[in-house]
Image (cartoon, rainbow, N blue to C red):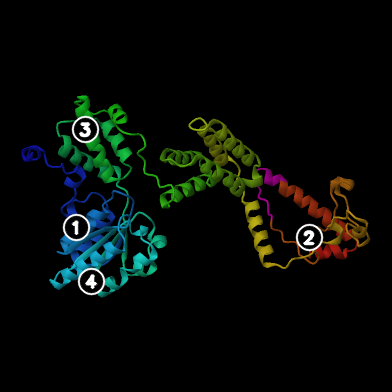
Amino acid sequence: MSDLFEALEPPRVPLAERLRPKALDEVVGQRHLLAPGKPLRLAFESGRLHSMILWGPPGVGKTTLARLMAQGFNAQFVALSAVFSGVKDIREAIAQAQATRARGGHTVLFVDEVHRFNKAQQDAFLPYVEQGLVTFIGATTENPSFEVNSALLSRSAVYVLEPLDAEALGGLLERARLAACADLPFDDDARARLIGFADGDARRLINLVEQIQIAAETAGERRVSAAFVEQALSRNLRRFDKGGEVFYDQISALHKSVRGSHPDAALYWLCRMLDGGADPHYLGRRLVRMAVEDIGLADPRALEITLNACAAYERLGSPEGELALAQATVFLACAAKSNAVYKAYNAAREFVASDESRPVPLHLRNAPTRLMKELGYGKAYRYAHDEPNAYAAGECYLPEGMAEPDWYQPTGRGLEAQIAEKLARLRQLDAAADKSSGGDAEGEACRA
């Protein structure tokens, strides 16, 4: 039986681990931090170890940099994952650090996904950071301004890591190919496809190369083409965070592209989100919001078209219904823009929230009973349809004593240009009515 186990091959070290940089100069990308004279390079060269937060998407080198930091300063490296670790693990890590200090050494405490620790767990590190027992390095994919306690944040330098660009990924792809399958050439289109699928993530790219190598061996392929890459890899490869910052950054980009009247950019962000797995229903709701916030009465068709697109998606589902959302997106981007209603609504809400509860003027009150009529409810109300031009010039519709707020200021774009002209004519009729009545007290109070 022992001979059987001795015959087994030892576990194969993953390619990503084999390619992990052993020195700072081997790190791919992040030149804005690691090039000569840049912040992290200076931190390594200064001889002074300090606590830090490494903020960036997956697979850009956060763990590698923390390991190199410990190695460069000859410190013990203790790693925790906030996904799997609890208070017991934190205590054990601190005990290790205390034992290391007793031997004259120092500890780098690396906490991956630090944003997943709650406030109490993050607070647990503070006294040990302040005592200098550990140098704290936290890694997070979320904005530390929102996810890391301010006390811990104030004691740490924040370094922002970026997704790897095509050039950096191209170099890494060649290194991975030579390490995993040096005798298997990749077409240029295949390389481009893999780099696109990697989506700025070095670890993902290396894993994809491993998958391609295994698939090529199984299929007996001697050359990797773009078609083979498509066939061998799962299509669901995009990085997309359905609840975090990347999600909100992309919906912000979509909204601003529509507002900026750039249909191609709007389509790009819509497709990016759909490709990444965003819920089309959510995207439809956001498009409706854009129709009323950024277009409004400049083109009332925007709301109708967008609601119809949402209904079309409900009926057709994916992928057919997504074309209706695309049509609405392009229309919104091309439509005349106005946020006049949006601004007027916000101003009215703010006024009402801070104002007293003004009574409804008697002439505007409903009078379904004799008593109400005897009390003057509805008295002297002027029915607009019976007036010239179906407009009761000089009539007051605001509470008594309330000045005309002029919240709604239509723009000169689209249909709102005509609305502005009409409102100007009506205000002229009001002014003429007030003048002919000698300055009606109720009208003056209403429009003071």
Considering only order in the chain, which callout, 2 or 3, is on the residue closer to the N terminus? 3
Residue that mark 2 sits on: 398
Q: Nearer the viewer, residue 295 or 413?
A: 295
On residue 68, which mark appears? 1
Residue 167 shows in the view: no
Q: Which residues are magenta?
A: 408-418
The location of residue 395, given as percent across then percent down, is: 84, 56
Sooner in the amino-acid sequence: mark 4 or mark 3? 4
**Distance CA(mark 4)–CA(mark 1):** 19 Å
Q: Nearer the viewer, mark 1 or mark 3?
A: 3
| Tag of residue 214 | 3
- Picture coordinates of residue 370, whole percent (x, y): 93, 57
Question: Sequence order check: which comes first, mark 1 or mark 3?
Answer: 1
Which amino acid, by three-letter code, is at mark 3? Answer: Ile
What is the spatial separation of the Cα atoms under label 4 and label 2, in whole angstroms?
68 Å
Looking at marks 1 and 2 on the same chain, the residue that comes earlier in the sequence is marked by 1
